[in-house]
Amino acid sequence: MAVAPAFAVSGAALGGATRAPRPTGCGERRRGAELPSRSLVFGRKCSCFPRAVRAGGSGMRTAAASGEVVIPEGENDGLTSSDDSVLYKSDELEVPVIDGESTTGVGREVKIESSESRHDAGEADAEALNKMAIESATEEKPRDVPRPSDGQKIYQIDPMLQGFKYHLEYRYSLYRRIRSDIDLYEGGLEAFSRSYEKFGFNRSAEGVTYREWAPGAHSAALVGDFNNWDPNADHMSKNEFGVWEIFLPNNADGSSPIPHGSRVKVRMDTPSGIKDSIPAWIKYSLQAPGEIPYNGIYYDPPEEEKYVFKHPQPKRPKSLRIYETHVGMSSPEPKINTYVNFRDEVLPRIKRLGYNAVQIMAIQEHSYYGSFGYHVTNFFAPSSRFGTPEDLKSLIDRAHELGLLVLMDVVHSHASSNTLDGLNGFDGTDTHYFHSGTRGYHWMWDSRLFNYGNWEVLRFLLSNARWWLEEYKFDGYRFDGVTSMMYTHHGLQVTFTGNYNEYFGFATDVDAVVYLMLVNDLIHGLYPEAVTIGEDVSGMPTFALPLQDGGVGFDYRMHMAVADKWIELLKESDQAWKMGDIVHSLTNRRWLEKCVTYAESHDQALVGDKTIAFWLMDKDMYDFMSLDRPSTPTIDRGIALHKMIRLITMGLGGEGYLNFMGNEFGHPEWIDFPRGPQRLPSGKFIPGNNNSYDKCRRRFDLGDAEYLRYRGMQEFDQEMQHLEEKYGFMTSDHQYISRKHEEDKVIVFEKGDLVFVFNFHWNNSYFDYRVGCLKPGKYKVALDSDAGLFGGFGRIHHAAEHFTTDCSHDNRPHSFSVYTPSRTCVVYAPVE
C-alpha cells in the first residue's frame, strides 16, 4: 500500500521504489522494535482469556432507542519442532467452556488427515443448494483441514532463505503449535472456524441464545425492540473467561422471542461507563433514516424469504481476469446503487467484457461510506446500504450462473475506530480485540489494529473468513492491507530494497504472519477451489507459496509495483521511457509465487490522484472525445498509450490481471464520496462537496456510446480479455523476451504461441521489421491496437499472412517480418 515491492527472481534480491501512501494505506515505522513476543501464552491461565483487562477510555457514548426497524426489501497431533522446548513453555491451555463444551460448541473430535489421505466428507445441505438443479454439478467439500507438514520445501525453492532459517522455523513451529492446540482444545480448525454457531445470536428449537466475549464489562443486558429496550429485563451471565450469555425461550405460541428485523444491542457497564454496543457477531446492521448510529438487526427471516442458491460455484480458472467493483458507486446515476441493480445491470457487462471474476469492495458493513469500505464496523454483516443479505446472495448466485468467480475484498488488517457502531472499545477497554496503546492504533488510517496473538481474535477472524464463504458462497478473498499486518512499522516510511533482513527481523509481526498462515490453511483446506490474494507491497518471500511448503499460503500476491511504475513514467514524457526498465518492472517478481497485476489501482481514481487516462489526456478528455469533432495530438497519444500500457501489463505482469471498473474505457471522472466540510484537530479546514453523489458513480454510458472515443478503448479492453481467454497467455509456461531496443523503442516477447510486438516510439514506424519466434509457420494478426474499432488509425493489414524463415533473430530459431507503426501493439498468432 505504501511502497513498491522488492522481488527476487530465482532467489536474487531486487529492489523496489518508494510510493506515497494513500489515505487507507499502511502505517508508521517503529524503530528499535523487538521481535513481537507471543501473546498466546501456553500456561494454566493464559493472557488470551484475561480475568481483568486494563481499562481504556475513548469517550464512549450511550445510545438507546425504541421502536421497530423494517428491513428494506429489495487432539493434538504431537507435532513439535526440534527447538520447541526453547521456544515454548507449554503446560496446559485453559480454554473457555460453555455447557461442558469448548466455546465453539462443537464438543466432538474432528479427524485431521494427511493430504495424501484427505477425502471429501459430507455433501452440502441439499436443500440449501437446490438439489434439483445442481446436485450432480456440485462437488462434495472436505470438512477437515490437512495436518501441517514439515514446511521445508521453501529452502529448495529459494536457498537464500537458509540464512533466515531460525526465523522461518520459529514462524512455522508457532503455526503448527497453534494448529495443535486448536485441534486439542477446540475440536480442530474446522470446528473452531464455525464459532458463529455459538457466538452472537443462534436460534434453536427452544429459543434464542446470545453469547458475547466482553471480559472488560462489569454487567451486560440484552436490549432491543423485543423488550422495549428495558435494561433490567434480560440480564446476561458471565463465565470466568469473559463470555456473556443469555437464553431467551420461545414465546408461548412457539414463535421467536426476538422478531426478525427488530433492533438489538447489548448494554454494558464498562470501565468507560454505560454503553450500548452492536453485538460483535451481528449478521446485519442498519442505520435508520435521520439517525446517526447504526443498530444491530436480529436477522432470522422465515424459510420462504431466505434465498436458495441455484447455481454451482465455478471452478477456479487457470488465468484470473478480475473486474474490481464497488456496488454502491456502480450506477451511472448519482446515487447509492443496490445489490439487485448490480446483479441485473453490472454483472452481464462484466461477463460481456470477458472477465472471469468480479472482486467486490465494501461488503463488510462500514458506518462511514467515504472509507471505501475499509473502516469496517460490523465484520459479519453485509453493507445494508445496498440491500439485504438475501439480495447479496442473489447477486452472487447470478454471477455463478454467468460463470464468474466472486471475490470479496476482506479487511482483517484493521478495524474502524468508531466506538459507537464497531469493535473499538466494545467492552469499555482499549485491549479487547486490539493491541493497547500506540501499537493498537494506526495513525494514518485512524483505525484499530488487531492483536493476532489473542485466542479470541483468532476465533473471531477465522470464523469471519469461514462465514462469507459458507453463508454467501464467495469464491475467495483479496486480503486488504497485508503489509500493514506483517510489520510493526506497517510499511509506512519504509523502502523495501529486497534485503531479506527487512522481512525476517525485529520489525516482523510474527503473530500476524501466523494468522495469515492459519487463514490460508483454513480456506484452502475447506474450500480447495477458493482463491486468496494478498495485498502485500513489501515483496515478503514465501508469501505466495503453499503452507505445506513453509510459505504463508496465498495463491497470489498483488503486484503493486507495476501501477506505481506507470505513475512514475507518466510523470515524464514517453520519449524518455526505457524499454528495459518497463520490462524489468513487469517481470521483477519472485519465482513460483504467482501475482495479480494491474496497470492502475482504484486509489488512482480517487480525488487527489489521477487515473492513467487523466495522466495522459487531462482536460482534453472533456472537449475532444466526441467522434464528431477533430481529435488532438494529446488525445491520439493518450488513447494509443492507454491501450499499450494495459496490454503489456497483462502480457508480462503476472498470472492474473485486475481492472477497476470504468478504467477499461478511461473513465473521465474521479471518485469523490459524498462528504460535508470538516475541521481537522490541527485546525485545518477541509471543504466538503455538499454531500454530492455526482462523482460517486461510474459513467458506463460513456464507454457504451458509439459516438465517443471511450468506446474504442473499451472495445480494445474487451478483445484483450477474450484473447487471453482463447490463448491463456498469462499462465503459459513459455515466455521469452527477445527484444528491448532502446533506440527503436520496441519490445518483442513471446507468451505461449503468441508473439507480442510493441512500438513505443512516438514518431517512427518500421517496415519489414524482423521479430524472432520459437514456432515456425504462418502467423496472422490476433489483436491490433491500431484498428479503427479501437480508435486507431487502421495502419495494419489484418488479412496479411506472415511466414517464418529459418533465419534466427534475437536468439530465436525462426523469425518473420512485420510492419509496426508508432505507438501500437500487435499480437501475432500462429495459423495451423
Image (cartoon, helix red, strand yellow):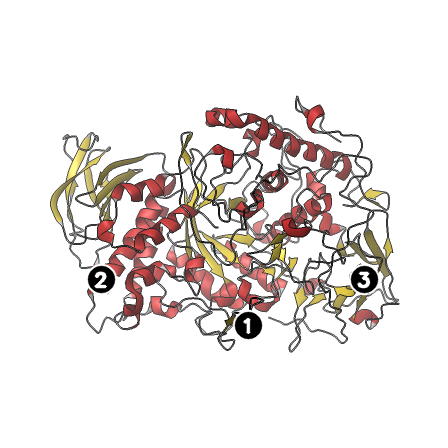
Disc 2 is placed on an element classified as: helix
Among the two numbered marks 1 and 2 on one chain, the one whose residue lies closer to the N terminus: 2
Tag 1: Cα neighbours inside 10 Å, few (<14), some, or many (≥20)?
few
Examine the rendering and report whether any part of residue 608 can be seen: yes
Say which amino acid is labelled 2.
Asp
Q: Quadrant of residue 785?
A: bottom left
Q: Are marks 1 and 2 in contact (CB under 8 Å)?
A: no
What residue is shown with label 1? Answer: 678
User: Which element type, helix, strand or loop, lies under badge 1?
Assistant: strand
Residue type at numbered disc 1? Gln
The label on residue 268 is 3
Foreground tag (3 vs 2): 3
- Residue 259 drawn at (x, y percent): 77, 68
Residue 628, placed above or below residue 747: below
Instruction: Tell me the residue at 25%/43% (across/down).
Output: 579
Q: How many marks?
A: 3
Nearest the viewer among 693 and 226 is 693
Q: Residues within 10 Å of mark 3 (few under 14, many from 20)?
A: many
Quarter of the image with the C terminus is top left
Residue 636 disc label? 2
Q: Are marks 3 and 1 in contact (CB under 8 Å)?
A: no
Q: Please name the amino acid that badge 3 sits on.
A: Met
Q: Position of residue 775 (x, y in %)?
A: 24, 33
